[in-house]
Image (tube, grey):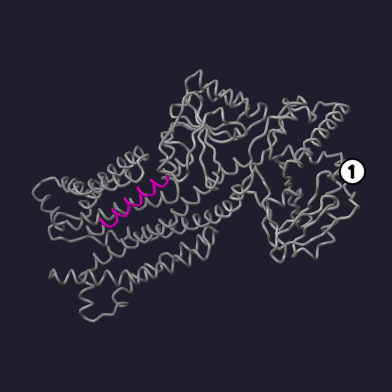
Amino acid sequence: MKKIYWSVLVTFLLSLFFYMGQVIAEVYNLTLPETKATIEVVDWDKSKSATQIYQTLEEFSKTKKLPLYKVTFGTSDDGSMVKNVYYFPSNKPYHYDDSSFEDKVQFKKSSDLTIENPLGSYYLTSSLPKELVSVFKDLGLEVTTSSGFMVSVLAQFFANDLGGLLIFLGLILFVIDVFVFISQSKKLGILALHGRSSLLLAVFPLRFELPLVIAVVAISIWHFPLGLSYFLVLVAIVCLWLGLSHILSLALANHLTTIVEKIKAKKPYKKLLFFNVLIKLLSILVCALSLSQGLADIDRLGKMEKAIAVWQKLPNYLVLNFSSDTSLFPTAHSSQKEIEARDEKARKIVSDLLSIGEETGAVLAESVSSEQAGFSYMVVNHQFLKDIAVYRPDGGVMGDFAKDSFHLIIPENLRKQQVAIEKTMREVIAFHQNVSADENESYVGEIDVTFSRSGQRVFNFNTSDFTQTQVDNPVILVANPVLFGEKVNALVGEMSQGHYLFQEKETVMDYIETHQLTEDFAGLTSGRELGLSKLRQVRSQFYLRLVGVVMSVLVFVVINYFLIMTYLESQKKKLVIWYLFGKSYLTRHKPFLIAMFCLPVLPLVVVMALGLVSLPIVAGILVMDVVMYSSFLLLFEKRERLVMLKQGE
């Protein structure tokens, strides 16, 4: 029984510290070592420009002597991910050893922040002052804060699926511990008969367990030294649990039998049978739910990662942010005359910016999901097709289109709907030419039609919702914005929503400053920087989920190993006698196998009926169960039988 205990204990410790190491590494990849508090900016009302925000934070941190750090992500010349750490104030350089991390880290002054979006995470290596939160709010930033960073990370670690499985494995260690003390029932009986305390028996195992724990944590610290504080906290938790487990399991073992039964070495394995049944049911349910959620998350995150990864190959496109109190949009109290004046001003400015953008490689990427029409569509300019590949049915990439006419790209599988699609897109063109036109009005000019490969997922440059960065099988209208005429109200809206992105900052900012429009715009911010930051988060989540799924399977195997070995231990004499009398493998183990194979069926059917687990996962778990019990039972029974015969029992 001690062999079983040590096998599970080693697996438990290695799994626990390995996974904690992975979690800490990924947390530090996204944040900073020794972080004490976090400010997460979740919304920006654009009453202040990004430049004004960074200047205010610089001044505050310098005055209050409070180090503050902002983390963003970019790419190096070779396309690999780079982590940028900006430190406030600029006269207090910051650095840490990045050799343990996947991404190269660049440390920069806060004065280098120019086009970076104020949204995102800011970190402190000291406690969070309330005054700083007020500064963020005064700048028009909606924030969430968290202190006690270590507690937060540990809570997230134990709250996720694999953390729950490891806690479950820790409880199984307690059950095995009970079996271990029961196997020493004769010694317990003799101590009780002489009125001596058996508490020392609970202390003795720690002589060997503590060096094992120290060895595992030493390896973990050597592999990832920055996780020292987390590993030490985990060591304290593990040691406390082991000590408590020994005391409680010893008390339970003493309670299950009388002194006479202990001296006669009667082991109450049958009384503990319900533990095995309960563990089997719980392990099946926990593993099924964990695998189901884990695989679903891996699929979702994998698709998101593939979609967002397009930002790595794109130029640094910039979003022009309209100020919250811009004079270009009417207010609820504007008169009709004022509304018309503001509209005219907005159209003139946006027309000028569109001209600048088209000359400097800006991209238009408007996407609409049209449920009524039965298809999604995009309105793009010619630069879009230079950055994003749209394929013909033969696999070739769509080339350049003439800029003096509209071009309509229809997926091959929507060819039969061509007439209806053309009608809808003519209405879209009419709307872009004049938003005040009758809703049934259609563009009557010429449209060139070509067909694309069916089922393409096209990137749409969405910087506001990274779960919606692709459009499935879209109809694409390619248009030079000039063709929409002078009434560009529709494009005013698209630009304000970040669907028209610029490549060159200087020409746009020169226009804004020359025409005294700094109060109307909150500046340019990088859409690519936001995309790459989200990409790093998604990759981190994907990796941890993948590790979690693999380790969930490992934990499930260990739990079944425990169930098989406790069964063999409790029935070993009977099994050897039956073997010597020629009983077949199935005859010897029929009741146990039926119980182990039938127990999972009902709970799995229930969770599948509730839609919590899919049929492939249920089938996979049942097949894994059959393979494990068939092979493990055959292997370990033979080994235990040889040991017993050699010992002459």
Whether residue 403 appears in magenta in the rendering, the answer is no
Which residue ends up furthest to the top in the rendered image?
63
**Rendered view: 428 above or below 592:** above
Between 370 and 24, the residue placed more toward the observer is 24
Specify whether 52 is left or right of 127.
right
- Horizontal and vertical percent position of residue 410: 77, 60
- Horizontal and vertical percent position of residue 277: 35, 61
Name the quadrant containing residue 137: top right
- Residue under the image location 74 percent in, 54 percent down: 376
Is the magenta region chiefly helix, strand or loop?
helix
- Residue 300 visible within the image: yes
Q: Which residue is mark 1?
A: 437
Q: Amino acid at mark 1?
A: Ala
> Which contiguous range is marked in magenta?
5-23
- Residue 145 visible within the image: no
Which residue ends up furthest to the bottom in the rendered image?
582
Between 74 and 379, the residue placed more toward the observer is 74
**Rendered view: 611 above or below 224:** below
Between 297 and 320, the residue placed more toward the observer is 320
**Rendered view: 628 above or below 193:** below
Specify whether 256 is left or right of 435.
left
- Residue under the image location 82 percent in, 62 percent down: 418
Between 409 and 164, the residue placed more toward the observer is 409
In this rendering, the count of numbered labels is: 1
- Residue under the image location 63 percent in, 29 percent down: 50
Which residue ends up furthest to the left in the rendered image?
194
Graded by Cα atoms within 10 Å as few (under 14), some (14 to 19) or many (20 or more), the crowding at tag 1 reads: few
SS class of the residue under badge 1?
Answer: loop
Whether residue 16 appears in magenta in the rendering, the answer is yes
- Horizontal and vertical percent position of residue 343: 84, 32
- Horizontal and vertical percent position of residue 631: 34, 71
Specify whether 332 is left or right of 560.
right
